[in-house]
Amino acid sequence: MPLLAVVGPTGTGKSDLAIALAQFLTASGRPAEIINIDSMQFYKGMDIGTAKLPESERGGVPHHLFDFLEITEESTAANYQELARPLIEKLQARGVIPILVGGSMLYIAAVLNDFNFPGTDAALRAQLEADLEEYGSVELHRRLAKIDPGAAERIIPQNGRRVVRALEIVTMTGQPFAAALPEVPEEWQPSLQIGLNGPREELIARLEQRVLKMWQLGLVAEVEGLIAKGLRQAKTAKRAIGYAQALAQFDGEMTEPEAIADTVRLTQKYARRQMSWFRRDLRIKWLDYRDPDLQNQAIQLVEEHLRLNS
């Protein structure tokens, strides 16, 4: 049974294309449903800052794995793998084509590629998380850079959770963190990955406008509402790009212009890291999100994949 994925950097219109593909397939007698693979859209109440599509804009297409985590719960690629794969197989058994959509690199790899995650050491993890709270993610990132420069290059200093996980794996195994992620992995099952991208300068400007819109839509008010639900205690959610800055603005640690500027900078940096990651996967079929014929090109790729894998 076919498996599709729409991937690429943030802000390139992945959700819109996935919905169009699902509608086309369903209308032609091949039902398709969407599975979210944006790790911040797993969280209930994190809507504006993740650009989560409301029900009214999902085109009648069933969507899965949105809003299934409380704000205080931790999200990991290993746990996501355990959720997503059975769901994919369940849909396929019903004759439904799953379409994975998102830009969370490790989560995509966890589902589509055939590899297992290293275990965990509870005591070591607790110590690293305590260090994270005491010294901050930037300091732990410096520590990671000394023992595994390759991993430090791939992980932004502000992503404390991934820095901690990388330090844990390197300390446990004595091997680079990247060794857990094969450069040319085997596929879990045959899939088509459609990647969306465009000129860097245009995407940079597009992301800036996206961040400004989030503030206009009320991101700070959304964060204020999440504080009562435990945002300050959250290991993952409170460090999400945009949410950390909006929280700092709410607390008076940043002005609104500072919070917006920092979010723009980190969002643009994250998009560059996404492309650096995705470019290594030569299986991805890239399309320009600005192309007026985008949907037809994507449909042609899908039809070819269906002929080969039906």
Image: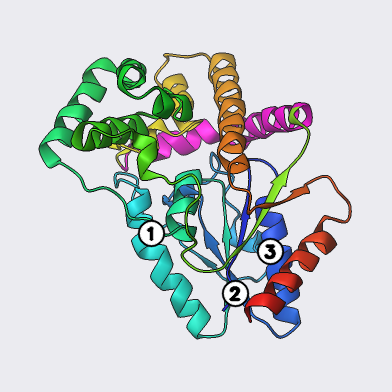
SS majority, magenta: helix
Which numbered mark, 3 or 1, is in the foreground of this view? 1
Which secondary structure, mark 1?
helix
| Residue identifier under label 2 | 2
CA distance separating discs 3 and 1? 23 Å
On the image, the x and y values in percent for residue 121 come to 15, 41
CA distance separating discs 1 and 2? 18 Å
Q: What's under tag 2, amino acid-wise?
A: Pro
Along the line of sight, which residue is nearer the eye, 143 or 96? 143
**Quadrant of the image occupied by residue 209:** top right
Is 15 displayed left or right of 141 in the figure?
right
Task: Name, please, the residue furthest toward the right.
Answer: 292
| Residue identifier under label 1 | 81
N-terminal label among 3 and 1: 3
The structure residue drawn at horizontal position 33% and vertical position 53%, both measured from the top left corner, is: 78
On the image, the x and y values in percent for residue 29 come to 71, 86
Compared with residue 27, is residue 252 higher up or lower down, i.e. above or below? above
Is 258 displayed left or right of 290 in the figure?
left
Residue range corresponding to the magenta coloring: 201-229
Residue 98 painted magenta: no
Q: Residues within 10 Å of mark 3 (few under 14, many from 20)?
A: many
Which secondary structure, mark 3?
helix
Identify the mark at residue 19; answer none if there is no mark. Answer: 3
Q: What's under tag 1, amino acid-wise?
A: Gln
